Each structure stands twice: as C-alpha cells, then as structure tokens.
Image (cartoon, rainbow, N blue to C red):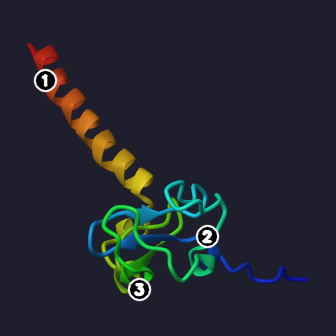
Amino acid sequence: MSEPAVDTTALDRYECRVCGYVYEPDKGDDKHNIAPGTPFAELPITWRCPVCSAKSTAFTNIGGVGAASGFKENLGYGLGVNQLTPTQKNLLIFGGLVLAFLFFISLYGLQ
C-alpha cells in the first residue's frame, strides 16, 4: 500500500523580487507578528515585505530549505550536478579545492 503524497509547497520559502528578502515559514515574521509555522499562502492580505514594503505578489516561490537551487526545468542538465542541494555543491567545490591543494603540496615530496 503506498503512502499518500505530501504537499510540501505549504512550507516553501518565498523571496521578494524587489529586495531579496526571504520569507521562511519556520521563522515567521516578528515585525508583523506572524507566528512561526505560518505558510506563505495564509499570510494576511495586508502583509508586506518587512524590508521594502512590497506586496506579497512581488514574492516568488524558491522551494524548501535544502532544495536544489536553480530553475526546475534546468535541473536535468549538468551531469546531475544541478540536482545537488547547495550544501552538497559547497562540499563538492571546496572538497575539490582541498584535494587539489593537497596534491600540489605533495609535489614537494618528490625531491
């Protein structure tokens, strides 16, 4: 028996296209007395961006915390790297830099 699909868009983060502020439902909005856990769709009609006072229509869904970054239609390209979360991408990039540095330093042992 399969489990019913869970709607995860309720707790997605939304970014203001004007100033870059990110509304995170887990944190809420202290400035406008919005309790933590309030989904973006349940915000009052009068709610505005706490940074630039833009209307809620100026916000775009950027997905949940840890979601793969980028446009959804582009996630299938890039040898699978586009499907990595930002944390995984950071580990891949900085891990590669550390490995390259260690290989470079090991060249001193060839004397």
Mark 1: give few (<14), some (14-19) or many (20+) Cα within 10 Å: few
- Report the residue marked by disc 3: 57
Q: Are marks 1 and 3 in contact (CB under 8 Å)?
A: no
Residue 76 visible somewhere in the drawing: no
* Numbered marks: total: 3
Residue type, label 2: Leu
Residue in the image at 27% along x and 67% along y? 19
Residue in the image at 60% along x and 78% along y? 9
The answer to whether 96 is drawn above or below residue 23 in the figure is: above
- Report the residue marked by disc 1: 107
Q: Is residue 3 left or right of residue 57?
A: right
Among numbered discs 2 and 3, the one appearing first in the sequence: 2
Mark 2: give few (<14), some (14-19) or many (20+) Cα within 10 Å: some
Residue 64 at x, y percent in the picture: 53, 67
Residue type, label 3: Thr
Among numbered discs 2 and 1, the one appearing first in the sequence: 2
User: SS at mark 2?
Assistant: helix
User: SS at mark 1?
Assistant: helix
User: SS at mark 3?
Assistant: helix
- Report the residue marked by disc 2: 11
Q: Are marks 2 and 3 in contact (CB under 8 Å)?
A: no
Residue in the image at 41% along x and 82% along y? 72
Residue 102 at x, y percent in the picture: 23, 27
